[in-house]
Image (cartoon, helix red, strand yellow):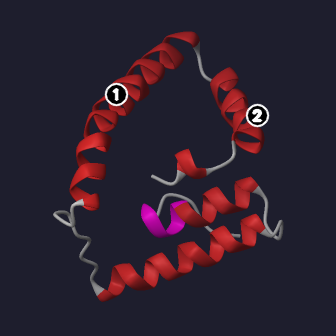
């Protein structure tokens, strides 16, 4: 979910490498799926912005989620300061959001 907030310059080469490593058929399916998901999510952005501005939409966080958010903020700050690379940031974020990758 944080991917849209990353600067394009370091991310684009990572996506290009990933795209180039996939077979063409898989790449086409992934592209179609990503396009569909992004389109669906974009439909809600305007509505959510209006609801937030009118104080009709609030965010509720449990304690565990607040702790995770704190760690993610720490990783973002390290990335912004140039202390960790884009790959390290993505691995760290994946560790706390999905448990997919191991943090270095």
Relative depth, front residue between 5 and 32: 5
Q: Which mark is residue 71?
A: none
Residue 24 against residue 43 in the figure, above or below? above
Point out the tag, 2 or 1, that comes first from the N-terminus: 2
Q: Secondary structure at mark 2?
A: helix
Magenta span of residues:
94-98
Q: Main secondary structure of the magenta part?
A: helix
Q: Residue furthest front?
A: 54
Please tell me which residue is depicted at 36% across the width and 79% down the height of the picture. Answer: 65
Q: Secondary structure at mark 1?
A: helix
At label 1, counting other C-alpha atoms closer than 10 Å, the crowd grade (few under 14, some 14-19, many 20 or more) is: few
Report whether 82 appears left or right of 87: right
Residue 69 x %, y %: 46, 76
Please tell me which residue is depicted at 71% across the width and 61% down the height of the picture. Answer: 88
Relative depth, front residue between 4 and 96: 4
Q: Which mark is residue 39?
A: 1
Q: Which quarter of the picture shows residue 81? A: bottom right
């Amino acid at each position: 979910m944080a991917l849209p907030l990353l600067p394009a310059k370091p991310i684009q080469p990572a996506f290009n490498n990933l795209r180039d490593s996939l077979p063409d058929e898989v790449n086409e399916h992934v592209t179609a799926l990503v396009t569909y998901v992004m389109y669906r999510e974009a439909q809600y952005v305007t509505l959510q912005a209006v609801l937030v501005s009118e104080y009709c939409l609030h965010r509720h966080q449990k304690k565990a989620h607040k702790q995770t958010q704190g760690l993610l903020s720490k990783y973002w700050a390290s990335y912004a300061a140039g202390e960790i690379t884009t790959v390290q940031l993505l691995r760290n974020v994946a560790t706390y959001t999905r448990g997919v990758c191991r943090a270095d």
